[in-house]
Image (cartoon, grey):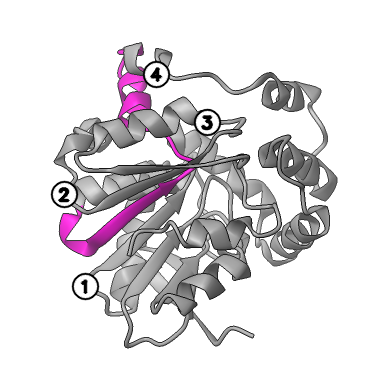
Amino acid sequence: MLDTHERFVVSGPLRIWTERVGDPELPAVLMIMGSAAQGVSCPDALVGRLIERGVQVIRFDHRDTGRSSVVDFDAHPYTIADLGRDCLAVLDGYGLQSAHVAGASLGGMIAQWLGVHAPGRVRSLTMISSSPVRAWARALAGEPADLDRLPPPTPAYLAHQAAGLPPGVESDVALFRVFNGPVRPFDEPAARAMLELALSRATDPAAAANHERAAWRPEADLLAPLWSITAPTSVVHGDQDPLHPLGHGEALAAAIPGAVLHVVPGMGHALTSPGLPEEVADLIRL
C-alpha cells in the first residue's frame, strides 16, 4: 500500500486536486497525464516503481477532470500553456523549487512547455507517447509542414473514432483496447477498474472534453523552439502507438539537444499491459 497524502492547491481561481506519494524529503517526480485524464490514470505500479528508485511522486487532476475545478470554457477558454501554469502551481503548492517532470501524450506537450518556459523548475524531462508541440502550434498558425511530416493515427484508431460509440465506461474500455495496441496483452479488468474509478470521482465527466478544445487553441508560447530545452531529456515511445505512431517520438527526440529515445517494443498509447507500467517507470529520467 502506497503512503499517500491528498490536498488541493490553488492555480489562480482554480482548485487542483493533488496527491503526493513517498517521502517529502526526496526529489520529486511530477506526473502529468494526458488529455481528459485524471491523476488516477497514472498506474499505482508505475508510482510504486518510482518510489523504489528513491523519489516522491506527485500526480494530480488537470482542471476539468476528476476533483479539480470545472471551467466554463466558452467564458474562460484556456490553452496548453495554462495547463502548464497549473503544473507550476502544483509545485508551488508543495513548496518545490523544481522536480523531475514526466508527461504522457498531451501531458508530454505540457512538459515541453515547462522545459522551454520554466527551465529552472525542471530537473529532467520525460515525454511518454507524445508529439512535438511546436509542430501542432505551427499548424495552428497556418504552417502545417511540420505536422504533415508526422505519421497519422492508425486505421484501428480512426475506425474506433468513426464508430461513434456513446460516452461511458464501455466506450472508454474499447478506446483503451485500441490504445493498448495489438501486440501486448490488454489488461481489461485493470483498465475497466481505473475508468470506473475516474467516472465515480469526476465532478463533471463531460468537462474533460475541453482539453481537446484547449489543444487546438493557438498559443504563441508553443512556437518557441524545442532546441532551447536544456533539461536532461528522455523520450519514451511505443512502436505500436495508434494515436502518435513512432515517428512522433522520433521527431520529438530529434528536436531536443541530447534527448535519448527509448523505443518500447509492443507498447501502444496506454499503460494497460501487465508489467508495462514498471518498464516505463524504469525509463523515466531521474
* C-alpha gap between disc 4 and disc 3: 11 Å
Where is 76 relative to 123, above or below? above
Question: Relative to residue 173, is residue 151 depicted above or below?
Answer: above
Compared to residue 226, the image places residue 45 above or below, namely below
257 lies left or right of 27: left
Amino acid type at mark 2: Thr
- Name the residue carrying label 2: 230
Q: Which residue is mark 4?
A: 147
Which circle's residue, 4 or 3, is located before the other in the chain?
A: 4
Neighbour tally class for label 4: few under 14, some 14-19, many 20 plus, Cα within 10 Å: many
Label 4 – label 2 distance at C-alpha:
24 Å
Helix, strand, or loop for circle 4? helix
C-alpha span from label 1 to label 3: 32 Å
Name the residue type under label 3.
His
Q: Which residues are magenta?
A: 118-144
Which element carries disc 1, helix, strand or loop? Answer: loop
Dot 2: within a 10 Å radius of its alpha carbon, few (fewer than 14), some, or many (20 or more) residues?
Answer: some
Q: Which residue does the numbered mark 3 point to in the structure image?
A: 244
Q: Is residue 11 left or right of residue 73?
A: left
Asked whether 224 or 265 is in front, the reply is 265
